[in-house]
């Protein structure tokens, strides 16, 4: 399905050097903010108090957040748990205040707003648990990265594997850089969104790499740069349709999803935008700088003069 067909190839690679410099500067800025400011980790990573509160009717999450905010808490997670009448509250740890004191204070506020609020469970989540979650998250990221490199190297060629993983890590670091610069809360849903973006970017890179390989086979008179331009141009219609529809869904979550989905949707929104950009202007251009050529992807046809005439498969083309 194509909404429009572009007759002349767009010279993407003509501006590859400038765009790569822009990407490098953006990447370094993201690393700088990560090092100097760090991530604003949520309760899952830093530890705190976990409360499960039950109501006799559907809970008003905004009223709950407003009531807890009056106690001076700024980083509180409030979300439905199981049913609309059950609420899960995560409170950050405070110096000099025990977990039971926190629970009692918050429950008092909630019962002042709605007398039907009942505490079902309250427990302290230590920083050790957060360290384990952070370590597991890093392991997940490392396994995904290694798997992507192996997959791209086997499916295409090692130059595409290197180009693809650099482009995809570029997206991940920039997302983290945004969260470090604005000090947005980095929670487990955001980590899930980052891993999802990694897979999403890989898919886009594979589509473009596939088209580059196909163009190398069909457009034998074009040089490498013209072949890459032709391949990317031929995917533009598909890119606009696919990413446009995906971005609409993610933006709907961002605008209407409420506080629970806000940062999850924010990470996806940033990641999809940079995923499109990196697949076109970073992955393809890095493969070009690494010296990818037609012979890397298209096997040469054997010389008929060297074929053994007694071989029953001689001359067969697969």
Image (tube, rainbow, N blue to C red):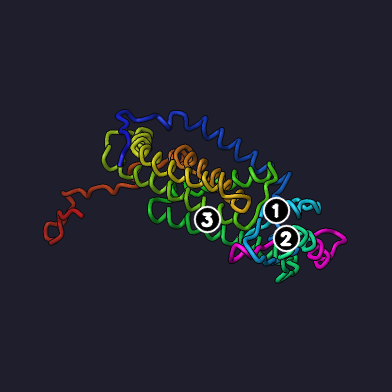
Read off the magenta span: 81-105
Gap between marks 1 and 3 measured at Cα:
42 Å
Asked whether the beta carbons under mark 2 and mark 1 sit within 8 Å of each other, the answer is: yes
How packed is label 3: few (under 14 Cα within 10 Å), some, or many (20 or more)? some
**What is the quadrant of residue 122 in the picture?**
bottom right
Q: CA distance from mark 2 to mark 3?
A: 48 Å
- 163 relative to 213 in the view: left or right: right
Judge by depth and name the residue closer to the eye, 64 or 286: 64
The residue that label 1 is drawn on is 63
- Local packing at callout 2 (Cα closer than 10 Å; few below 14, some 14-19, many 20+) is some
Name the front one of labels 2 and 1. 2
297 to 56, vertically: above or below: above
Magenta-colored stretch includes residue 92: yes
Residue at x-position 54% and y-position 61%: 143
Dot 2 corresponds to which residue? 114
SS state under label 1: helix
Residue marked by disc 3: 145
């Amino acid at each position: 399905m194509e909404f429009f067909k572009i007759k002349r190839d767009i010279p993407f690679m003509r501006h590859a050097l400038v765009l790569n410099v822009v990407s490098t500067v953006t990447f370094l800025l993201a690393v700088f903010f990560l090092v100097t400011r760090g991530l604003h980790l949520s309760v899952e990573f830093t530890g705190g108090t976990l409360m499960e509160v039950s109501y006799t009717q559907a809970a008003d999450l905004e009223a709950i957040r407003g009531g807890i905010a009056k106690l001076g808490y700024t980083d509180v997670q409030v979300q439905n748990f199981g049913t609309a009448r059950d609420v899960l509250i995560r409170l950050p740890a405070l110096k000099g205040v025990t977990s039971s004191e926190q629970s009692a204070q918050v429950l008092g506020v909630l019962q002042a707003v709605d007398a039907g609020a009942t505490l079902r469970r309250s427990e302290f989540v230590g920083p050790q648990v957060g360290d384990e979650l952070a370590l597991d998250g890093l392991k997940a990221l490392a396994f995904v990265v290694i798997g992507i490199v192996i997959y791209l190297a086997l499916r295409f060629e090692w130059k595409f594997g290197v180009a693809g993983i650099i482009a995809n890590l570029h997206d991940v670091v920039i997302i983290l850089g945004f969260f470090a610069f604005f000090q947005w809360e980095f929670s487990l849903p955001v980590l899930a969104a980052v891993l999802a973006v990694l897979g999403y970017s890989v898919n886009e890179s594979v589509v473009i790499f596939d088209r580059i390989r196909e163009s190398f086979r069909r457009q034998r008179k074009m040089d490498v740069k013209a072949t890459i331009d032709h391949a990317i141009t031929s995917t533009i219609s598909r890119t606009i349709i696919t990413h446009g529809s995906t971005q609409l869904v993610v933006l709907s979550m961002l605008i209407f999803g409420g506080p629970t989905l806000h940062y999850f949707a924010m990470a996806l929104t940033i990641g999809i935008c940079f995923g499109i950009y990196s697949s076109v202007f970073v992955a393809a251009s890095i493969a070009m700088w690494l010296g990818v050529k037609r012979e890397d992807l298209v096997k040469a046809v054997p010389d008929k003069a060297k074929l053994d005439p007694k071989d029953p498969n001689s001359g067969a083309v697969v």
